[in-house]
């Protein structure tokens, strides 16, 4: 999935800040120079409803107000946020 497709499908902001992501989703994790997002969406009853997004800091400001850009989004959808987060950490 391209970044443009992911932005549309999951309504991901790009660029953004970690603070903005935290206001929209339950979990946002700073992981080194990246920000990981296991995000949920409704995909139908009994279907996988989690995705993973990896953002990277665009400057040396690694605070909650530092600008981040979308780097990668999972092609697969996950049954839970733990598997989505595992995918994001491996990227």
Image: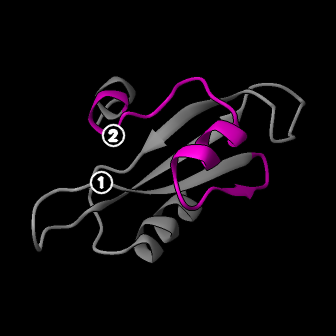
On screen, residue 12 above or below 58: below
Q: Decide if residue 59 is on the left or right side of residue 23.
A: right
Mark 1 and mark 2 lie on one chain; the one further toward the N terminus is 2
Residue drawn at the location 44% of the way across and 34% of the way down: 12
The stretch drawn in magenta includes residue 70 = no
Mark 1 vs 2: CB contact within 8 A: yes
Quadrant for the N terminus in the image: top left
Is residue 85 depicted above or below 4 in this figure?
below
Looking at the image, which residue is at 11% across and 74% down? 46
> Quick one: label 2, few (<14), some, or many (20+) residues within 10 Å?
some
Residue 16 inside the magenta-drawn segment: yes
How far apart are the alpha carbons under marks 1 and 2?
Answer: 7 Å
Q: In what quadrant of the picture does the C terminus appear?
A: bottom right
Furthest toward the front, the residue is 23
Structural crowding at the residue carrying mark 1, measured as other residues with C-alpha within 10 Å and reported as few (<14), some (14–19) or many (≥20): few
Q: What residue sits right under mark 2 in the picture? A: 10
Question: In the rendered image, which quarter is residue 57 located in?
Answer: top right
Write down the region rendered in magenta: 7-33
The location of residue 49, given as percent across then percent down, is 26, 62
Quarter-of-image position of residue 65: top right
Q: Where is residue 86 in the image (x, y as percent from the top left)?
A: 50, 71
Q: Whole-percent x and y of residue 29? A: 67, 59
Identify the residue at horizontal 37%, vertical 33% (top origin). 11
Nearer-the-camera pick, 26 or 53 = 26
Instruction: Say which of 56 and 19 sits in front.
Output: 19
22 vs 70: above or below: below
Residue denoted by label 1: 41
Residue sitting farthest toward the left: 45
């Amino acid at each position: 999935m391209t970044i443009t497709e992911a932005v549309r499908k999951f309504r991901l902001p790009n660029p953004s800040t970690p603070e903005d992501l935290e206001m929209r989703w339950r979990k946002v994790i700073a992981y080194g120079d990246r920000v990981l997002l296991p995000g949920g969406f409704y995909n139908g009853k009994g279907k996988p409803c989690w995705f993973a997004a990896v953002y990277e800091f665009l400057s040396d400001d690694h605070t909650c107000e530092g600008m981040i850009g979308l780097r990668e989004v999972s092609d697969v959808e996950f049954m839970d946020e733990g598997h989505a987060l595992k995918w994001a950490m491996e990227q």
